[in-house]
Image (tube, helix red, strand yellow):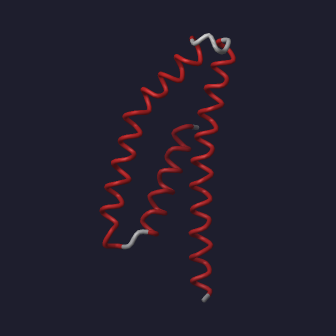
């Protein structure tokens, strides 16, 4: 499910970006998107490791509560990113439809 969600959201964001950025600035926008994607992929394992270590061994939570809260946190972050991508694409589709009608 993760790979499917990641593939769909990444493809949606790339398509939306290519539609919203002018042709002359598209290479710069793609370079920035690639940079920030690579940055997130390099930082994510450390952040995930910290979250796992903290939630399971900090003593603040019982280990089962920490594990459940960790997965809920990750699910909320994934859901928020997917929802924002879908909302952004819907706005683009609505704008394109209104332009075609006029």
Q: Which residue in the rendered view is the most extreme toward the front?
A: 60
Q: Is 45 situated above or below 40?
A: above
Where is residue 45 drawn, in percent x and y?
43, 28
The image quadrant that residue 14 belongs to is: bottom left
- The residue shown at (41%, 40%) is 40
Q: Work out which quarter of the rendered image holds the C terminus and state it.
A: bottom right
**In the image, residue 48 above or below residue 93:** above
Image position, residue 50 (x, y; %): 49, 22
In this rendering, is residue 18 above or below 5?
below
Q: Looking at the picture, how far across and down is residue 82, in whole percent?
A: 59, 49
The reply, left or right, for residue 82 in relation to residue 20 is right
Residue drawn at (38%, 73%) of the image? 22
Residue in the image at 44% along x and 63% along y: 17
As drawn, is 62 to the left or to the right of 46? right
Q: Point out the image quarter for the N terminus.
A: top right
11 with respect to 70 (left or right): left
Looking at the picture, how far across and down is residue 60, in whole percent? 64, 14
Q: Residue at x 66, y 30 (%)?
A: 72
Q: Nearer the viewer, residue 8 or 21?
A: 21
- Nearer to us in this view, 24 or 93: 24
In this rendering, the answer to whether 29 lies above or below 42 is below
Q: Nearer the viewer, residue 58 or 35?
A: 58
- Say how many tags the image has: 0
Residue 61 sits in which quadrant? top right
């Amino acid at each position: 499910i993760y790979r499917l969600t990641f593939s769909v959201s990444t493809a949606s964001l790339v398509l939306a970006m290519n539609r919203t950025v002018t042709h002359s600035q598209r290479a710069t926008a793609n370079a920035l998107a690639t940079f920030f994607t690579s940055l997130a992929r390099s930082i994510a394992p450390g952040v995930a490791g910290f979250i796992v270590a903290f939630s399971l061994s900090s003593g603040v939570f019982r280990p089962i509560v920490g594990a459940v809260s960790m997965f809920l946190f990750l699910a909320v972050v994934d859901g928020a990113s997917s929802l924002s991508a879908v909302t952004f694409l819907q706005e683009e589709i609505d704008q394109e439809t209104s332009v075609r009608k006029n």
